[in-house]
Image (cartoon, rainbow, N blue to C red):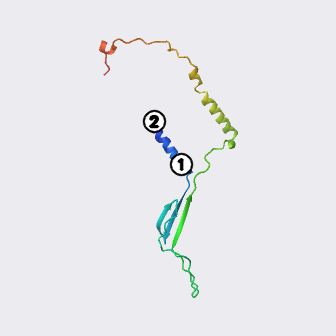
């Protein structure tokens, strides 16, 4: 169970790093106030009601406006994931040095301790004692 949890957590962290560094663009096409089309990574399709150009009548000086509009949203991902250790204060640098030293030396005592029971051979069991004496846990 613990291994499964570690694998799921590692997978989730990988997706967080992937999606936090990814940039993408959302393109939306509005006709009036309603959303007609939206697209991810490409331009949204038009509804076909757009005007080719603004038409100016020389008679009455009126301008026809286009009822459609395009909206583009760019979402920038994080580009700097590497922590710069040159900007740490002296107290932070001292903490990192002491933590690293103590963590690396944490397991040295385990390797140097002699095993006291390495020469001891346990006795061979010829009979099952619980069955021999009729002692059972209930």
Q: Position of residue 136 (x, y in %)?
A: 31, 18
Q: Residues within 10 Å of mark 1 (few under 14, many from 20)?
A: few
Task: For mark 1, give the secondary structure.
Answer: helix
**Of 53 and 137, which appears nearest the observer?**
53
Quarter in which the C terminus is drawn: top left
Q: Which residue is mark 1?
A: 18
Work out how far the residue at label 2 is from the one at label 1, CA to CA, in angstroms.
Answer: 23 Å
- Residue in the picture at 57% in, 85% down: 57
Q: Position of residue 100 (x, y in %)?
A: 63, 33
Quarter in which the N terminus is drawn: top left
Q: Given contact means CB atoms under 8 Å apart, are the residues at marks 2 and 1 in contact?
A: no
Residue 125, above or below 61: above
Q: Position of residue 53 (x, y in %)?
A: 56, 77
User: Which disc is residue 3 wearing?
Assistant: 2
- Residue in the picture at 56% in, 80% down: 55
Residue 138, above or below 15: above
Looking at the rendered structure, the number of numbered marks drawn on it comes to 2
Q: Residue furthest bottom?
A: 59
- Residue in the picture at 45% in, 38% down: 5
Task: For mark 2, give the secondary structure.
Answer: helix
Q: Quadrant of residue 105?
A: top right
Residue 64, above or below 122: below
Q: Position of residue 4 (x, y in %)?
A: 44, 38
- Residue in the picture at 55% in, 17% down: 114
Residue 55 vs residue 131: left or right? right
User: Which disc is residue 71 wearing?
Assistant: none
Q: Residues within 10 Å of mark 2 (few under 14, many from 20)?
A: few
- Which badge, 2 or 1, is on the more N-terminal residue? 2
């Amino acid at each position: 169970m613990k291994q499964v949890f570690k694998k799921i957590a590692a997978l989730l962290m990988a997706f967080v790093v992937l999606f936090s560094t990814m940039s993408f663009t959302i393109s939306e096409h509005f006709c009036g106030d309603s959303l007609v089309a939206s697209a991810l990574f490409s331009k949204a399709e038009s509804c076909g009601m757009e005007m080719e150009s603004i038409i100016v009548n020389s008679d009455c000086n009126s301008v026809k406006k286009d009822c459609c509009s395009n909206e583009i949203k760019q979402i920038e991902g994080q580009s700097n994931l590497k922590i710069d250790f040159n900007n740490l204060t002296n107290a932070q640098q001292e903490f990192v040095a002491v933590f690293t030293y103590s963590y690396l030396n944490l397991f040295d005592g385990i390797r140097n301790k002699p095993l006291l029971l390495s020469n001891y051979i346990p006795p061979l069991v010829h009979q099952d004692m619980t069955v021999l004496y009729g002692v059972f846990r209930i």
